[in-house]
Image: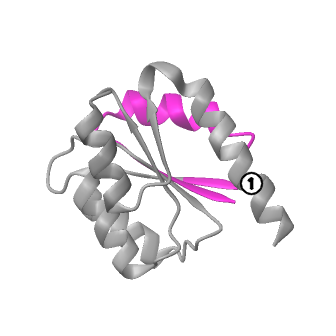
Amino acid sequence: MKVLIVDDHSSMRQLIRLMVADLAESTTESTNGSEAIEAYTSQRFTGNDCVLMDLQMPVMDGLEATRRLHDVDPDARVIIVTQYGDTHLREAADHAGALGYVLKENLIELRQLISSFASKSELT
């Protein structure tokens, strides 16, 4: 499975990349939602791959990018990775089509979620 990491902070992208390196066949990084959509389409990501999306970013935020990714690929698997544990943001992420919502302080949960996606991909 390919993983697209979307975050405007390079140190966070690097940390996430290190956390998921052994779970991903390859990783790609984007600094905002607009770049993420371009990378998703140009690098031919599919519903068997995974997008790790921050919420607060310049140019295009994570919620809008998640909605647009689902316009491009209704099967896109997006996990929100954020520092905001707000219930309303979790609901908005769910409505935008995110399959998961993980706080940056708990990246072990992110590994578990990606592992479950990888296991499901192997079955198809």
Query: Residue 56: where, in percent of width, then height?
Result: 21, 40
Q: Which residue is mark 1?
A: 118
Query: Relative to 17, does residue 52 appear above or below in the rendering?
Result: below
Q: Residue shown at 31%/46% (left/top)?
A: 91
Crowding at dot 1, Cα within 10 Å, few <14 / some 14-19 / many 20+, comes out as: some
Q: Is residue 86 visible?
A: yes
Q: Is residue 24 visible?
A: no
Q: Amino acid at mark 1?
A: Ala
Question: What residue span does the magenta drawing correspond to?
Answer: 1-27
Query: Residue 26: where, in percent of width, then height?
Result: 65, 55
Q: Secondary structure at mark 1?
A: helix
Query: Relative to 97, does residue 10 appear above or below in the rendering?
Result: above
Horizontal side, residue 117 vs residue 47: left or right? right
The quadrant in which the C terminus is found is bottom right
Q: Residue shown at 51%/28% (left/top)?
A: 15
Query: Residue 94: where, in percent of width, then height?
Result: 37, 53
The quadrant in which the N terminus is found is bottom right
